[in-house]
Image: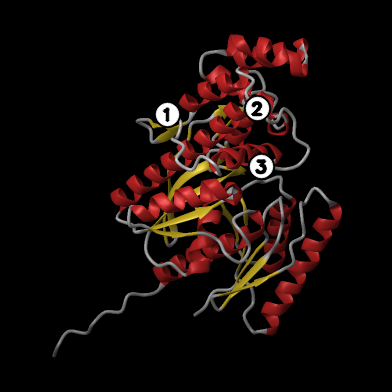
Amino acid sequence: MSTTVLAVGVWLKNAACLVRDGRAHWSPVHGDLSDPAACGALERSLQALLAQADAAGAPVQAIAHDLHPDFFSTQLALQLAATLGVPAIGVQHHHSHIAAVVAEHRIEGPVIGLALDGVGLGTDGQAWGGELIWMHGAQWQRLGHLQPLALPGGDRAAREPWRMAASALHALGRGDEIASRFAPQVGEAVASGVQQMLAKQLNCPTTSSTGRWFDAAAGALGLSLRQTDEAEAAIALEAAAARWLAPHPDTAPLPGAVIDLQNRLDLRGLMPALFDANANASAAGVDAAAAGFHLALADALADWATQAARERGSRDVCLGGGCFFNRILRERVTERLQAASLRVHRPLDKGCGDAGLALGQAWVAAQQLAAITSQEQPTKETAPCA
């Protein structure tokens, strides 16, 4: 019997997805749910998808949603599930990213996933975003993650890359340099305040986000101090790297990325070269350092996933999350994984960002329902011979 699941998507670039008879039926992309108009559009889309399922004689059996309790989509999913009398199934954000790739490519068997983005709530209540994942059917496990960075000022740090650069300085044990480095750009009082905030760990939640590491690199190189658009700093960093790599394709990766004993990918060792390049005030040096950072990150990610694939007996690696819009990162990781004789899969129809995440939510929920149904099926006994 096929399973019908409705998934409500997430906060950014929201889109809903109905999975019925193994096929995905999408709503339009509604945009970010900070806009009341987008919230209203999501409500209308969910009603339309429910009507579509009922008309096909396949009523929805579960509503899938993100783990974040404050998302409008999550709250709407819980209300809708209660009204319909069906379970609401929460699915972790980065698990959904990898599951969306598995669903789209119809991969069977275990996979290794690299889920890299700006933020998603983890199962531990922390902000995730640089995740190494193993997944097989309804089962999944977080194998490792990027070394966390503090977010001085909380969400404000995601809008001000210089704060992430300051966080990286603090993580290097060089926090006493923050005020002198950044006061000329942001003011003595603000720079000193962030330095003290990090020293005392006040309003400094941590994140394993790849997006925030890109911000830290861009801030360290002086490419972006504040950003008004999403991923503005990361785009500036990629552009600088591309400028250098076009005439210098044989550029070597920066040294310093390591995998520690807890299977965390630690990028702190890459940062001193970026701060030095900025201090030298050379545009070519900044571009070269941006390129070296990209190559080092990509190679470390590929080696990390290759090791996990060998340990877990998988030939398939799935790439998900908005950081894979970065062409340099995507192509370098793919080339390295394929050179290790691994099959590489990434989202196709909806892209690697949050607009396609609902498919992963629905797929995971369907897998969980199927596993429960299988466990509830009575075991058939063979009658003894007379």
> In which quadrant of the rendered view does residue 208 lie?
top right
Residue bearing the label numbered 1? 255
Left or right of residue 144, residue 228 in this image: right
- Give the camera-side residue of 172 and 37: 172
Name which residue lies at 64% across and 54% down. Answer: 354
Q: State the residue at coordinates (86%, 57%).
A: 37
* Image location of residue 306, percent across then percent down: 35, 48
Front-most of residues 290 and 305? 290
Q: Identify the residue position indicated by label 2 in the image.
A: 219
Q: Amino acid at mark 1?
A: Pro
Q: Is residue 212 above or below residue 107?
A: above
Query: Can I make out residue 369 in this image?
Result: no
Q: Residue 44 location, x and y as percent? A: 80, 67
Q: CA distance from mark 1 to mark 3?
A: 23 Å
Q: Earlier in the sequence, mark 1 or mark 3?
A: 3
Asked whether, in this view, residue 244 is left or right of residue 154, the answer is left
Q: CA distance from mark 2 to mark 1?
A: 19 Å
Q: Quadrant of the C terminus?
A: bottom left
Give SS at disc 1.
loop
Q: Which mark is residue 353?
A: none
- Residue drawn at (14%, 88%) of the image: 385
Q: Nearer the viewer, residue 216 or 128?
A: 216
Q: Residues within 10 Å of mark 2 (few under 14, many from 20)?
A: many
Q: Is residue 185 above or below residue 327?
A: above
Please determine whether, in this image, residue 184 is positioned above or below residue 259. Answer: above
Indicate the position of residue 174 as horizontal and vertical percent values.
55, 13
* Disc 1 to disc 3: CB gap under 8 Å: no
Query: Secondary structure beneath disc 3?
Result: helix
Residue 235 is marked as 3
Label 2 secondary element: helix
Q: Residue furthest right?
A: 37
